[in-house]
Amino acid sequence: MKKLFLLLCAGLIAAISFAQPLAQVSPEKAGMDPSRLSNVDAIVNNSIEKGEIPGAVLAVVRGDKIVYLKSYGNKSVYPKAEKMDVNTIFDMASVSKSVGTAISVMQLVEQGKIRLTDNVAMYIPGFNGYENPENGRKTDIRVIDLLTHSSGLPPYAPAAQLVEKYGSPSPEGLLEYISTCKRDFAPTEKFQYSCLNFITLQHIVQNISGISLAEYARKNIFDVLGMKHTSYNPPEEHYPMIAPTEKQADGSVILGKVHDPLARLLNDGNSGNAGVFSNANDLAVLAAALMNGGEYNGKRILGSLTVEAMTRVPAGLEHIGRSLGWDNYSPYASNNGNLFHPVKTYGHTGYTGTSFVVDPVSKTAVILLANRVHPEDKHSVVRLRALVANAVAGAVICK
């Protein structure tokens, strides 16, 4: 009995320790100039004053430590004003592609269950490749083509039309559309950002694992790293911590449900292109794990060689500028700023205003969580992200 008690205590202590957020240290102790780093405050506050965003949370990570964690403005301005705080949970939108879907895929790759050059039709029967309209020659679409947005799939799908045809939700109807819709060009020919790529990857993960993407990512990524405020379809007890997104025609706001129409209406929140909700502390843990070769606090989500391969633009796809689920230097990578490593820096943005950037050379991560679609979807944070990244990079004085 005593032995059982000791084992239970040990297990409890271990659970508490691995669920802790990153330790926070002063910028000086992490090789950063605090006065230079504080330039971010004026940048974010200016964006709030111009009405681009109601508020934001910024986390800066160096190695395995948080060196800056701050909230700005409001998480909500409608139907009432509520102050932002550093624990606010955001709809991560397309950042979900990287932190949820892509990492899940790469885990299956390193387990020998997927090969990057496999034909997608191996995992999704009836999934069409590309057919050249001039000579009828067919080309398979591969897993790597989906991950790098070089598949030729169209950028999006007509959500309203699909709901009318299949009902809501209808993951099967959406997959049928993706499997058979017109391909815009031959795989690897060029870059075209497409949510359909990652919804397809979602189904590959599900068909191999036998569980939903949401459950797979929770069990194998979020729970492993102790990311206790990160999930698809967040529980209602998290709702008071969530920043609402867009005001709807009936006067309500979207709260706790993913903003993206395909993810919300067709996939019911369990979607490869969007659907993850998270906060700055949890994402800081993930950034630390990636900068440490896939491991944080004794908990590993990926092998070190897997992380290296995942975040490197594949040979032969330099013209694409995307690595395996991340953006390195495609036209969408302006959130990386101008000062971090021009090739090895990787990250992703989300339509709602979120951004996740990692420079593995300086071991610096910038997590900027803004809420630009609240209460209305009419502002841009493209410039804001780059300015913040530059201010953070400019504060690095010791590698």
Image: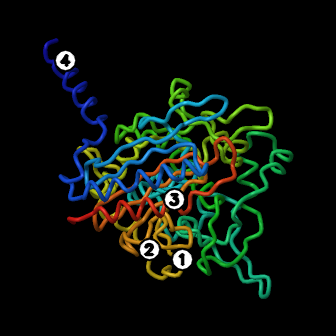
- First in residue order: circle 3 vs circle 4: 4
State which quadrant residue 250 falls in: top right
Going by the numbered disc 3, the residue's amino acid type is: Leu
Q: Which quadrant is the N terminus positioned in?
A: top left
Going by the numbered disc 1, the residue's amino acid type is: Ile
Marks 4 and 1, Cα distance to the nearest angstrom? 56 Å
Q: Which quadrant is the C terminus positioned in?
A: bottom left
- Residue for badge 4: 4
Name the residue located 46 percent from the left edge and 55 percent from the top edge: 43
Q: Where is residue 277 in the image (x, y as percent from the top left)?
A: 52, 41
Q: Within 10 angstroms of label 1, few (less than 14), some, or many (20 or more) residues?
A: many
Q: Is mark 3 on a helix, strand or loop?
A: helix
- First in residue order: circle 2 vs circle 3: 2
- Residue for badge 3: 384
- First in residue order: circle 4 vs circle 1: 4
Task: Determine which of the numbered discs, if any, sits on residue 40 in the image.
Answer: none
Going by the numbered disc 2, the residue's amino acid type is: Val
Marks 1 and 2, Cα distance to the nearest angstrom? 8 Å
The figure's colour scheme reads rainbow
State which quadrant residue 22 falls in: top left
- Residue for badge 1: 320
State which quadrant residue 336 falls in: bottom left
